Every structure is written in C-alpha cells, then in structure tokens.
Image (spheres, rainbow, N blue to C red):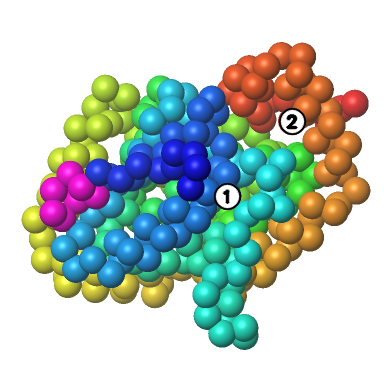
Amino acid sequence: MKNASTITVERVTPKIVKIKFANPPVNLIIPETVTRLHGLVRELGEDEEVHVVIFTSGTADYFYNHFDLTRISEFPGASEGSEANRISVWTDLVIRLSKAPFISIGAIRGRTRGGGNELSLAFDLRYASRENAFFGQPEVGSGVIPGGGGSERLPRLIGRDRALEVILSSEDYDADIAEHYGWVTRTMADKDLDSFVDVMASRLASFDKTALAAAKMQINRATLPPDADLQVAYTEFLASLSFPGFKPRSAKLLKFLTDLGIHDIEKRLGHYIGIASKF
C-alpha cells in the first residue's frame, strides 16, 4: 500500500492485542479499513495465544464512524470461498468477529454510527465513555437502509420497538440512553474507561482460553442472528443506494457540509439528517 493503514496493531502481552483505528478528521470507514480488519480478525482467530482483542480509536471525538459512501464502489466485494458460499467481506468480518475464539472488547469514545455501530455490535463487550460516546444508525434518514448487522443485532439487544426507534429515527443517542437500552455493556466516566478495559482484558487473559471460547460459543448459540440474514441485509443495503430518496438527501447533507464544515455536521449528524428531511 502507498498510504499508511488506518489500522494499527499493538501486542500488549502475548495474550492481549489492541487494534486502533484512526482516519482523521472524522474516522470514516474506508475500503482499506474493512480489508485490514478482515485480515486481522482471520489472523488473530488462528493465533492460539490470543485471548482478548481490544478495539480503540486514535481520533478524538470519533470511534468507528459510518462508511464513506463516496467510496462505496471501492469497498471489497465477496470473500474467498466457493461461489455458492461467498459472502461480502464486511459480512464475513462481523460474523467472524462475533464467533472468534478470542473475546473482543470495545473501548468506545466518540461517534459510533452506521457501519461503525454495526462493527461494535459484533464485539463481545462494549464499554463506553459516559461523557463522550454517541451511537446511531443514520441510514434511513439518509434514504437507505442498514446492511452491516444493525437490523439483525439491535433488536436482540434492545428489543423490537427500541430498535425500530433507533433505526427509523436516524437520531444520535448518548451513552446514558445506550446503557439504559442495553445497547452497550456498561458506561463509565471517561477518565476510568481505559483502566477498566485494561483490567477486564487482563482478567479474561488470565483464564483458560478453551473455557472462554466454549462459554462464548454457548451464548452465541442462543443470541446471534443467522449468518444468512446478515448477508441478505448487506445485499439489501447495496440495493437501497438506488432508492429515490438517497441522492437528494445526500445533496442536502453535502450542502450542509460545505456551509458548516465536516466536524459540525459529523458531531451532530442525527440533527442535520432531521433538518435535511424537512426541505
């Protein structure tokens, strides 16, 4: 690759790996992000030493944000495998992550929306900064539909009605509401987030990996959506890019972006999506 990766990896201990995402200014998920994460999850899933993988952000105010839809045609297509069994790389990524033999932990600060929220829903544990974490699925208000697992995983976590509210409203939700809904595992003061996650990771890494993976598999059996539903959703998302409302709403948001700047828009994306729908 000519450019530096948006993903960096730190082997904290032989059993703990930290993955940091940074794509300033607002941490949009780009094709390279997906390809790199997919490769890492496959690689770490085959590493018998790895017990815990921590996901963090290196960009202030943003965790994993939404897809950069201006580059959607560049996102990787089908993963490896026979033609009959091939699925999109993104779908394969979130499925592999939720079924990996390691425990995945998100240390969430900043905006976590769209594909970024769907990635975080595939984590085993989500710990969020009470002051600085915000969540959302902005697709419907933008004229499209989710495709990375939001519609499949959120109802299992927060219930049908709350999932409908989140997805249909395309609004931003703060960490307190996310915790109340059951969207995240736990929230805590921002100053305590890193130390809490580190202590939890160390505790889990001290346990037998076979027992950790087996217990995770039991819980997965009772809670995960069918793989086929996730693949259908990604196909439907791609098709929704042709919905009649997508282009005019994108044009309105682009006008806001030009007038106000990317940080103002991205920090309050749910607000501006609501305004764009009124004109």
Query: Is 14 covered by the magenta stretch?
Result: yes
Mark positioned earlier in the residue sequence (2 or 1): 1
* Residue 179 appears in the figure: no
Residue at the far top: name it: 260
Tag 2 residue: 273
Circle 1: element type: helix
* Residue 15 appears in the figure: yes
Amino acid, disc 2: Ile
Circle 2: element type: helix
Q: Residue at x 84, y 32 (%)?
A: 251
Tag 1 residue: 31
Q: Residue at x 63, y 54 (%)?
A: 75
Q: Determine which quarter of the picture holds residue 188.
A: top left
Main secondary structure type of the part rendered in magenta: strand
Q: Determine which quarter of the picture holds residue 149.
A: bottom right
Span shown in magenta? 11-17
Q: Horizontal and vertical percent for residue 191?
A: 26, 22
Q: Is residue 178 left or right of residue 11?
A: right
Residue at the far left: name it: 206
**Toward the viewer: 268 or 51?**
51
